[in-house]
Image (tube, grey):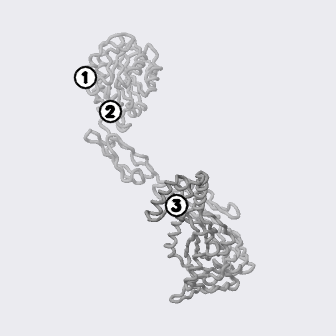
Amino acid sequence: MFSGIVICLYMRRSVCLLWYTIFYTQGKKGVDPMTDQSWPGILCRIAPQFNYHAAMNWLFYFISVLLAARATGTLCFVCDTAKSNEHCTRKGRIRRCARDQMCQNEARTTDRGIRIWKRCKQKLACENNYRQNVQCNPSELGSICRCCCNTDRCNLKLLYCHEKIIEQFPERILLCPPLEPPDNGRVICPNKNDVSFIGVGTTCTFDCDPGYDVIGQSSSRCTKLPHQNVARFDKEPPMCLKHECAIQHTELEGGNVTCNDSNMIGSVCRFVCEAGYVLSGSNLLTCEPSRFWSTVAPTCQLIVCPAHIDPANGLTECTEGNRPGSQCRFSCNQGYALSNNSTLNCSFTNETNAEWDKPAPICEEMLCSELGQINNGQFSCSKSNHFNSTCSLECNADQDYFPSPRNTEFVCIDGVWDAPRPCCTRNCPPYTKMDLLLILDSSSSVGRENWKSMMQFAETVINSFVVGSNLTRVSVIRYNRKVDNATQILFNDFLDDQEGLLNKLRTLPYRGSGTNTGQALSYAKRELLKESNGNRKEVTDVVVVITDGRSHDKVAGPSRALRNDGALIYVIGVEPDNGNILDEEHLIDVSGSATRVIRVTSGFSGLTDTFQADLTEHICGNLCSDGDSITGRFLERFSTSRKTY
């Protein structure tokens, strides 16, 4: 119809008549639009007389009004958590909802009575309300009733859902009779302001006045009786009785107590201890309305020092326990020792406290020294280094090592091993570990024959030891006015070739004059003791200087520098056959100590096999001094005696 009006008002009559014939008369015979009195016929006849633009303006205005009216939502009444419909009406307001919303009422049955909400709600949600109203039963807690309407102010006057349910199912509303409060007490129900609605599921509680206690059940619940349409509370109301504290304080061990009103509510008790006792807790207690005292009763504690118990692995003996004036003595079991004082005394520090005069000792185990790791063997102990531990030593016999001393079993007693720590060693000579440097004086005063004796002596010394990369390494130089570095033998020249070393030694020439021993010592420090030349930093350097006379240069400084690097310098001073006397102070300057000076007074002929054997014995010394190293052996043997040959 609307499209026809637009066509008739805005287009020509011919178009209007065509529309009339096709869509209105639908081919009916005898119908003439020029005489037809229906509204389409009249519209076709008068359409040409209209002002089309004015008509269209009115038409669009009319359409806008219709659309605006169609887009405007329903007027609804809104409120939140009202206690009744009248309460909702008083505090609520009118609100225009959105176009796709309706007016909704919601009533919930809570433990505080009915609560009401009115609001705008989506139409789809309202449709769901009808399916969800299976929860709607106002006589039961948790009931939720919802329903909607879609006309202005349709939810204003009535609760709508709730009243209709009550009208339709009045027998479903079950109420319990009001509860009477107990004497000296009161009853508290969630819907106390609405005594007409104490419905099934409502719980009421009971409380008593100050000074009284609830005797019985403190709450009761409204429930439906089985097989009856009647509701009753499930518990009888309690009684409120005046109360008192259950405990009556009359005695206090080690003191006394006084109360101003026995154990009645409000009574105050005072506690006092006798001399020699101290109060533990509060000195005042009050019987409170809760029928309990304000705190636990105090006690009178005897003033004592902290109790001592026997220390671990020890005993304690006290004259009077831990009371003031007592003396305690501590002792330890065998293998243990007290950490400090063995006697303690207990005495008062003030009127309420007593303390021991010193900290209590403990019994500490007397441990023997740690055996640690041992070269070329291992220790086996029953209890490590603890008291009464028995240890033994097993050496690598496949490498010719054996324990020294032979009886290797030893015991830890009171923190001390009952025997010296053994070691694993090999026969020395030939086995030892050192870097042996021979510095040979080849000055003209020595003479060729004596030089041969010196070389034979050096060869015999070298043959006394096993030369090897992990045992003894040997370096040899000769000197006079200067060092002969062209014929020198370095530590790494013959690491595992003892025969090659001796062959090289036999080729050393004898020539030159002058005796610059200081220069030879400096050269040894600067060149021969380098790691690149085979010297080992972890092995003791033993420097043996063989000379027959006084040096022409200063020796004290070079000797000190060499010894500061850890080298041990020994001087074999050989008095020549020409009757010259050796300067012993000069030899001490070379060695740094008189204990490392050996004088041979029978000339170079004194460098015999006997002297060589004695020298190697000094080098080997105690087999267990520093393992296979000879440092300790030299220090032990040469620090006690000097020999003259």
Nearer mark to the viewer, of 2 and 1: 1
- Residue 263 visible to an observer of this rendering: no
Do the residues bearing badges 3 and 2 touch, measured as CB atoms within 8 Å?
Answer: no
Residue 377 or residue 452, whichever sits in front: 377
- Give, as a three-letter code, the residue at label 2: Thr
Name the element at disc 2: loop
Which residue reaches farthest right? 260
Name the element at disc 1: helix
Compute the Cα span from label 1 to label 3.
151 Å
Q: Position of residue 432 (x, y in %)?
A: 32, 33
Name the element at disc 3: loop
Q: Position of residue 609 (x, y in %)?
A: 29, 25
Residue under the image location 74 percent in, 80 percent down = 261
Residue labelled with disc 2: 432
Residue labelled with disc 3: 34
Nearer mark to the viewer, of 3 and 2: 3
Residue labelled with disc 1: 500
- Residue 38 visible to an observer of this rendering: yes
Check disc 1: other Cα within 10 Å, few if <14, some if 14-19, many if 20+. Answer: few
Does residue 17 lie above or below 443 as drawn?
A: below
- Give, as a three-letter code, the residue at label 1: Gly
Q: Position of residue 54 (x, y in %)?
A: 61, 52
Question: Based on the displayed image, in which of its 4 quarters is residue 355 positioned?
Answer: bottom right
Question: Which of the marked residues, 3 or 2, is nearer the chain's N terminus?
Answer: 3
**Left or right, 330 with reference to 457:** right
